[in-house]
Structures are given as C-alpha cells and as structure tokens.
Amino acid sequence: MVYYVFPLIVFISSVYINRTFDYTKLIRLGSYKNWIVAKAKTLLLMDLYLIGLFLAATLIVAAKTSFSMEWSDIGKINESGNEILYTLQSRFSNPFIALLLQIGLFLLTIFTVQLIMCILYAMYKKQSVLHILNILLFIVGIAGFKLIPDSLSFLETPNYLLLFHGVERFNSVVVPFAIMVFVLTIAILIIDNIDSSLVNAKQFFIRNYPIIIYGLLCLLGIWFNVERYVNEDVPIWTGLTVTFIGTTNEMYSLLSFAYYVVIFIGFVYLVQLLLQRYLSEMSYFTIIRYRSMNRWFLSWFPKILKSIVILLFTLMAVTVSIAILKGYAIMMPDNFFQIIYHFTTNGFLQILFYVLFVIIVSLLTKDVLKSFIALLILTIFMLPGFRLNNFMPVGLNSMGYLLENVSIYSISLTLIGYIVIEIIVLLVLLNKKDYTF
C-alpha cells in the first residue's frame, strides 16, 4: 500500500490529469469547477477499478485457504510481527468490518489527494507542480513514519492509507477518517469558489506567503510542545508555560531557543518587511502630506501595536485550545495571574522593544536588512554565558522565568526603561532637520 500501490495510483493520476487537460474542453465545460468535477468522477471510477483489481488479486491468492467470517486464533497473539492482525482484531469484532473500513479510508485518502492535484493543476497548469507533489508524497509515505516525531503523527501518510497504522497512532478509529474528511471538505470549498478566486488566490499566496509560512511554523511548534507533556497530567496553563519557555539564566535548550526565535524574532521579520515598504515609499511628498515625520510615523505604527496584541492572544488561544484537545487538565494554577501577566504584558513590552530597535537601526542605516541582522546578533545574549544577568533586554519574556526566583515585575521595569530610551532616540531621529531620503 505505502511503497507501491499508493505511489502508483498517484503517478497514474498525475499523468492522466496532465495529458487530458485541454482548453477546448475547458471552454465546453464552462468553468474550472466543472472541469475538476469531471476529472474527479473519472478518477473515482479509476480508483474503484484499481481497488477492485487489488481485491481480486487478494482473493485469487487466498483461493485455497479456509474461509471464515471470524478472526483467526493467530490474530489474537500479541507478538512482534503480528501487529496488524492483533491491532485490528482488538478494535473490530469482525474482519469484514475492518476490511470495509480499510477500503473506505484508503479510497477517501486517494480521492482527496487527487482533488488536491486537480486544484493545483487548475491553478498553475504545470506538470512540474504535480511531479513535486508526487515526490513529496512518496518521501513522506516511505520515510515519514520514521523521520516525523510521534507528536506530529497527523503528518504521516501511512496513518491514512493503512487502517491499523492510523488506529495505533491515534488510538482511535474515528480520528484518521475525521482528519481526511476535514481536508476533503476544505478541498471541496476551494473547488466551489475556484473560478471566482483563482487569480485572487494566486496573488494572495504570493503576497502573503511569509505570513502563511510563519503561521504554519507557529502551529507546528505549539502542537509539538503540547504533545511532549500530554501524558503528564498537567494543567492547560502549564502547557502555555512549557510551550514558550524560551531561555533563562538557568535554563537553556536548543529547541526552546530556536522556537523562541521563530515565534518572536520571526514576527519582527514580518514587521521588517512592512517597514521596508514604508521606508521605500517615504519621500519629500510624504512629509508634505503628513506635515512632519512624527505624523508619518503615527499613521502606521499603531497598526503594529495592534498586531502585537493580536499575535499574543492568538498564540495563547491556539495553545490552550490544542492543550484542551490533547486532554490537559482544565484548572487554574496558583500562579495563574503571573502566567497571564508575563505572557501578555512582558510579551508585549519585549516585542515592542524588538520592533523599535529595528525601526531605529533602519532609520540610521537606511537599510532594513541591517536592522534585522543587528536584532539577530542581539539573540546571542540569550545563550548560556552571554545573558549578563538579564542586563540585555533580549528574551526577557521567556516563560521559564516563572519557574525561577525572578520577579516578573522587575522584568517589566527593565523593558520599560529600555523602551523609553528607544522612544527618545526615535524622536531625535524623526525630528532631525536635515533628514535625507
């Protein structure tokens, strides 16, 4: 199924989609939606034919064996090498039910992948896109369950091709079906609106791909960190703490450091892209329009403040939601107020410091890239031996400080002091009489 049948069906489907695309047929069908529906019907019949052929081959091979509608005694033996039968017989009272569910899951997965292939081809009309998808599916299929950690098991292709694999990974019969139905529903919604939004969708992804990639990295990181403590009976707010633990004077791990950089420095990178546009558009006409640099600055900076607030509350809501879904205990710890205060208030102050730092360096050097490089250099002070007893205002919103004897309110005062200095420097730069563009 994983090494031969699935790659073969995907390859045949990609060849069929590419070779049968014709603009005259597209004109006759009237829309991309109708074209995808027509292809989907043919591909579904092809899937049923291949599954029927596979079942026929299985029956021919088993022609001389005894027939029974009950599980054999061998299936009840829990030994290495017998995981498939043992897992299925422990979940299903009848092998016929397991067979039907296996066929249903495999067909659902294959058909969903084929719809995605049709959508991608309608968007790009390039065979290379299908080839890339084939390679990715093949790599994830044959090696994903060995390379992907258990916390990200929802990304493993075998979980949706083999019933016993999905049941064993998710400890549920419903979950693999539910995930594929969810993906199929999204694909159908895209197909239903593909004609009206095809051009807009391309422009949207091209224009917002950094934000999309950033959001996916945030989501994967939250899922991974929450999964690490899923069996330790901890409350949801502790899950928030360990997810954004960062680094402190006494605690450091490469994984926590890397995730901190992705979340918070990554957000500043998005701000840097926006800043680059604002600076490139700034000219004498801009000053004439806003009458001063201060008004020009205040015309867009409140949007960044709003985005910082949205980021923090979104991260909190997503983390808590995933923790609840993973079975974390719903209870209020004794330091609940400190957790919320440190994550929101100190988180806001820390990101604000990063943003102001990037703006100041950009105005001084007239180069946005140099400002971001300077910020990355500052992250060195998050490493062991470089923290200087929290003298440098970097990584001070790490949730690990809640686990140490450090006053989170003194952290707030430290960040406020640095932000005041940054505001003074920024005002001096914005009110320069000889400011050049």
Image: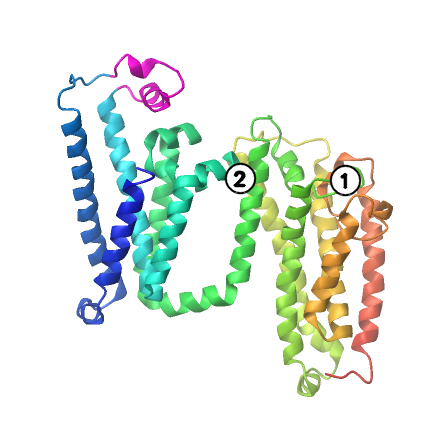
Q: Nearer the viewer, residue 123 or 311?
A: 123
Query: In the rendered view of the protein, which quadrant contains the C terminus?
Result: bottom right
Residue 215 x %, y %: 54, 53
Residue at left offset 77%, top offset 46%: 383
Residue under label 2, please give it: 322
Q: Amino acid at mark 2?
A: Ile
Near mark 2 (Cα within 10 A), the count class, few <14, some 14-19 or many ≥20, is some
- Amino acid type at circle 1 is Tyr
Answer left or right for 251 relative to 31.
right
Residue 84 colored in magenta in the image: yes
Q: Residues within 10 Å of mark 1 (few under 14, many from 20)?
A: many
Seen at 77% across and 42% down, the residue is 248
Residue 193 seen from this side: no
User: Where is residue 224 drawn, in percent x and y?
Assistant: 56, 39
Instruction: State the residue in front, 407 or 16.
Output: 16
Q: Which x, y percent locates residue 263?
A: 63, 51
Region of the chain picked out in magenta, as a range = 71-93
* The magenta stretch spans residue 178: no
Left or right of 109: which side holds 143?
right
Q: Earlier in the sequence, mark 2 or mark 1?
A: 2
For mark 1, what is the residue? Answer: 401
- Judged from the image, the secondary structure of the residue bearing numbered disc 2 is helix
Answer above or below: position of 23 versus 377. below
Q: Is residue 230 above or below residue 92?
A: below
